[in-house]
Amino acid sequence: MSSYRIPIYPDFIRSKVHFSDEAHPLEEQGLIYLPYPSVANLLGLLWLYKLHKINVSHLSKNNHVHPETKQVSKHMKEFGFHILGRAIYDATFSEMMRPFAHVLSVVHAAHGAEIIIKARIAEEHPLLIFKSYPKSSTTTDMLSIEELFEYGRTLMYSELPEVLWASTGYRIKQLNRYQDFGNLRNKIVHFAPPALDASTETLKFTFEVLDYMVHDFWGKSFVEYSGYWDDVIICDGYLREQLEKLNIQVHPETQKLIESID
């Protein structure tokens, strides 16, 4: 396997970057793995350093943070899947006896999107999802989850695609749709629901944008999590009916999963 080791400056003088044909960044202690040859990822890494003001070469083994922070990505992933399950549930059924359920599905879907992307970034290192950190003066021990919650500040929805790319090399394929959906969520949360079919927007976003992304990340779908909110949503065909009615392009593996339960 061909590789190159080069110094990075000004503050990366003691760091090395290992260019490899294996696209898995931040892998070995003291080295940063990037796809070979990827100038774009190197620039992204430098941008990541500028954003976080930390030496990324020290992030690799998570040795300098509290052990509990290593579970951040696992918990965020599970939480995000449940939120997206709720979004699908709210968007699938009518609003009878559930006022504003459809517009709230947009809020849930955008929240779920933010959480799962942060979960993927946090798999590289949990501190990468933060834009500001607790000060060493707030603790005499290693950085803990409680201190991150209290004093840290995480990245915003709109900032996540660039950090996702810089830390993992993954580019969101439908970036405009991702950002547009975030803008729709902001309109609903900060103003009032606009005149649109919110349930359609949610189902199209979750299945045509997010579900494909999750398959790329982890080789699975979150669709089954909608069953936690209503156990007949898939098995009685309610979800499939909506997806077919709206002509939504479902990931082939997710389609097989729905058909196996339906």
Image: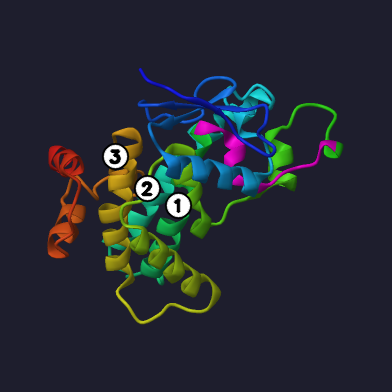
Q: What residue type is labelled 2?
A: Arg
Mark 1 neighbour density, 10 Å: few (under 14) some (14–19) many (20 or more): many
Q: Quadrant of the N terminus?
A: top left
First reached walking from the N terminus: tag 1 or tag 2: 1
Q: How far across and down, in percent of the image, does residue 89 sit?
A: 32, 55
Give the number of callouts. 3
CB contact under 8 Å: marks 1 and 2: yes
Q: How far across and down, in percent of the image, does residue 86 sit?
A: 38, 52
Q: What residue type is labelled 1?
A: Pro
Q: Which residue is drawn at 16% across and 53% down?
A: 240
Q: Residue at x 70, y 41 (%)?
A: 148
In magenta, the rendered stretch is: 124-136
Q: Does the magenta stretch include residue 130?
A: yes
Viewed as shown, does residue 51 lie left or right of 185? right
Q: Can residue 119 be seen in this view?
A: no
Labels 1, 3: front one: 1
Q: Which residue is drawn at 51% across and 47% down?
A: 163
Q: Is mark 3 on a helix, strand or loop?
A: helix
User: What is the quadrant of residue 246 in the picture?
Assistant: bottom left
Residue 222's disc is none
Mark 1, residue position: 161
CB contact under 8 Å: marks 2 and 3: no
Mark 2, residue position: 171
Mark 2 neighbour density, 10 Å: few (under 14) some (14–19) many (20 or more): some
Labels 2, 3: front one: 2
Q: Is mark 1 on a helix, strand or loop?
A: helix
